[in-house]
């Protein structure tokens, strides 16, 4: 049982390049989330998927797109990377869509540097 | 909109002494409150949560937190700190009712336990 896995662990991009961050969970969770972590700002929600087939914007969605490929997988795409997107990206999942008290489980993160 | 304040960026405590990491929140209605811990180069790990009932919540690794509705606080405590408790701690909140599925995180508090 690996929990939440993310690939790649680290990536360097040039401004304007595109890339997709992959996330998968093996806990049969319904909901999945993408956050970015910047120093002194905590975690900010980019996009989330309450259940398979649905996605919604979070606090900071601009410059990103997501795909809930199936129940296990939730990818985050940067179409044209900008230096402001340099950050650590975390994927998370939780058991029950609509259960507000559910605990989120986090992946190990992807460190992205945009030059 | 909900918010979380962690007023101390850094907390230093000697090993064996009690520790407190402070958190105050703002939310419409009643809150669900969470503490997460992040070790270097790792994802966030769930520590404990307040849903309802007893204001004193016990969690992993000997941590506990006290919900104080009148002061809108949810401070994390441990009676005797260990060097291995050194990490980044995040408080998070979401409302009990409402359409928002977003978990709002504080900016984090770096705890250093000195041997």
Image (cartoon, helix red, strand yellow):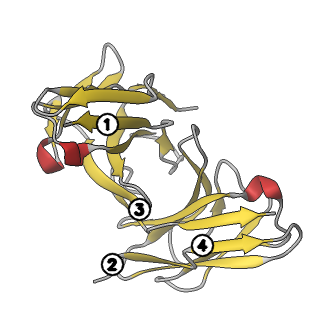
In the rendered view, would you say B102 is above or below A110? above
Q: Nearer the viewer, mark 2 or mark 4?
A: 4
* Apparent side of residue A3 relative to residue B66 in the rendered image (left or right): right
Residue located at (46% from left, 29% from top):
B9
Categorize mark 2 by other alpha carbons within 10 Å: few (<14), some (14-19), many (20+).
Answer: some
Name the foreground residue: B103 vs A63: A63
In the rendered view, would you say B97 is above or below B56? below
Element under disc 2: loop
The quadrant in which the N terminus of chain B is found is top right
Categorize mark 3 by other alpha carbons within 10 Å: few (<14), some (14-19), many (20+).
Answer: some
Categorize mark 1 by other alpha carbons within 10 Å: few (<14), some (14-19), many (20+).
Answer: many
Q: Mark 3 points at which residue?
A: B42
Q: Earlier in the sequence, mark 2 or mark 4?
A: 4
Q: Which of marks 1 and 2 is in front?
A: 1
Q: Which label is found at residue B112?
A: 1
Residue A69 is drawn in which quadrant?
A: bottom right
Residue B66 is drawn in which quadrant?
A: top left
């Amino acid at each position: 049982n690996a929990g939440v896995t993310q690939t790649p662990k680290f990536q360097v991009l040039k401004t304007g390049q595109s890339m997709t961050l992959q996330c998968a969970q093996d806990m049969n969770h319904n909901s999945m989330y993408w956050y970015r972590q910047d120093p002194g700002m905590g975690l900010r929600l980019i996009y989330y998927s309450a259940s398979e087939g649905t996605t919604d914007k979070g606090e900071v969605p601009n410059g990103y797109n997501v795909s809930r490929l199936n129940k296990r997988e939730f990818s985050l795409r940067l179409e044209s990377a900008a230096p402001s997107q340099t950050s650590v990206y975390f994927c998370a999942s939780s058991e029950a869509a609509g259960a507000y008290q559910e605990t989120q489980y986090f992946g190990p993160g992807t460190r992205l540097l945009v030059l | 909109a909900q918010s979380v304040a962690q007023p101390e960026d850094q907390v230093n405590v000697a090993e064996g002494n009690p520790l407190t990491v402070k958190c105050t929140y703002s939310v419409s209605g009643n809150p669900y409150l969470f503490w997460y811990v992040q070790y270097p180069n790792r994802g966030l790990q769930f520590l404990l949560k307040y849903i309802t009932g007893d204001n004193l919540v016990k969690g992993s690794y000997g941590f506990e937190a006290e919900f104080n509705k009148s002061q809108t606080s949810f401070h994390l405590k441990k009676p005797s700190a260990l060097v291995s408790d050194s990490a980044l701690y995040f408080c998070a909140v979401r409302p009990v009712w409402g359409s928002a599925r977003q978990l709002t995180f504080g900016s984090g508090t770096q705890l250093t336990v000195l041997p």
